[in-house]
Amino acid sequence: MDGADAIDVARASRGSFSADPQSIFETWAEFGIWAKTGLTDAPREPVNFGELQCPIPAPRQLFAVGLNYGAHNTEVKRSSSAAPVVFTKFVSSISGPYDPVHHPGGDLDWEAELVVVIGRGGHHISVDAAWGHVAGLTVGQDFSERVSQRTGSPPQWSLAKSYAGFAPLGPVIVTPDEFARPDDLAIQARVNGEIVQSARTSELIFGVPELISYLSEIVTLLPGDVIFTGTPAGTGIGMNPQRFLMAGDVVETTIEGIGSLRNVVTADSELV
């Protein structure tokens, strides 16, 4: 992307790089070197942002972090952990920035999140080196169905957050060097135009470098992996009285310098 225009990477690179995002992550270092000079004279094409699809459609690993904003922990009456609370959203839940989300029944909630995309994989990555492994940042919405989440002990976080369409991502990936401070971005969620979440990513208990380092001590991170970093206060389950999404509701998730998701809740006639 270049402002309101886009560049066809496959054509501009004469086939050296594919239009498939995953293949670009696999050669992220080489792509970065080419992009510094290869895009200068490349033809631009106007973009209809409403037609953009998920920029990370098929990561091999998707990590999610819970209870990572102090104010959110307070609203859900949970204490902060000494280490990141990690779970997964299964990759089949990934959807595009403007795709509808189908209401599965139960209590459907919203969670605005900053999402990290890994460019250079690795194991035992230090905190100081972590930003060098990041391809970019994007916007994520961690839709959650609270009834199934609270079924059983311990809670079923991964299943309750992995219904189809529960992980919209996009609309673009922005490289860290495009931000003055990539660790301090405004994040916001609106439901039907009403602001329900508003915070800054500098409020994360465990920031991006700490999360990458912690995960890589156990798991080998791979190019194109995705990390949902946690949600701030303002979720429906934390309200008094509690508030959940219904068919027809519009959820907009915005992060400064990246853009916005817009997902409309639709009814599934077999379940709702």
Image (spheres, rainbow, N blue to C red):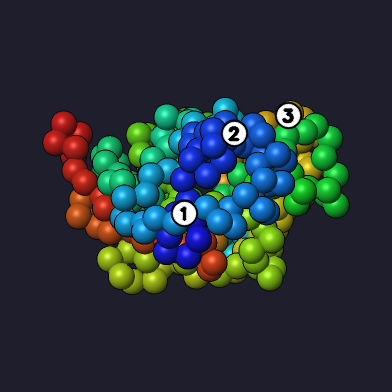
- Placement of 20 over or under 71, stated as above or below: above
**Crowd band around label 3 with a 10 angstrom C-alpha radius: few (<14), some (14–19), many (20+):** some
Q: Residue at x 62, y 49 (%)?
A: 38
* Disc 2 from disc 1: Cα separation: 16 Å
Q: Position of residue 34 (x, y in %)?
A: 67, 45
On the image, numbered disc 1 is attached to which residue?
43
N-terminal of the pair, mark 1 or mark 3, is 1
User: What type is the residue that disc 3 sits on?
Assistant: Val
Left or right for 172, reference 202: left
Q: Is residue 86 visible?
A: no
The picture quadrant where one finds residue 212 is: top right
Left or right for 33, reference 61: right
In which quadrant of the rendered image does the C terminus lie?
Answer: top left
- Placement of 14 over or under 134, stated as above or below: above
> From the viewer's perspective, is the residue at label 2 or at label 3 nearer?
2
Q: Nearer the viewer, residue 188 or 122?
A: 122
- Label number found at residue 259: none
On the image, numbered disc 2 is attached to which residue?
16
Specify the farthest residue to the left: 269
Q: Position of residue 164 (x, y in %)?
A: 35, 34
User: What type is the residue that disc 1 sits on?
Assistant: Pro
* Disc 1 from disc 3: Cα separation: 40 Å
Q: Nearer the viewer, residue 172 or 92?
A: 172
> From the viewer's perspective, is the residue at label 1 or at label 3 nearer?
1
Q: Secondary structure at mark 3?
A: loop
On the image, numbered disc 3 is attached to which residue?
219
Q: Secondary structure at mark 2?
A: loop
Q: Position of residue 147 (x, y in %)?
A: 37, 40
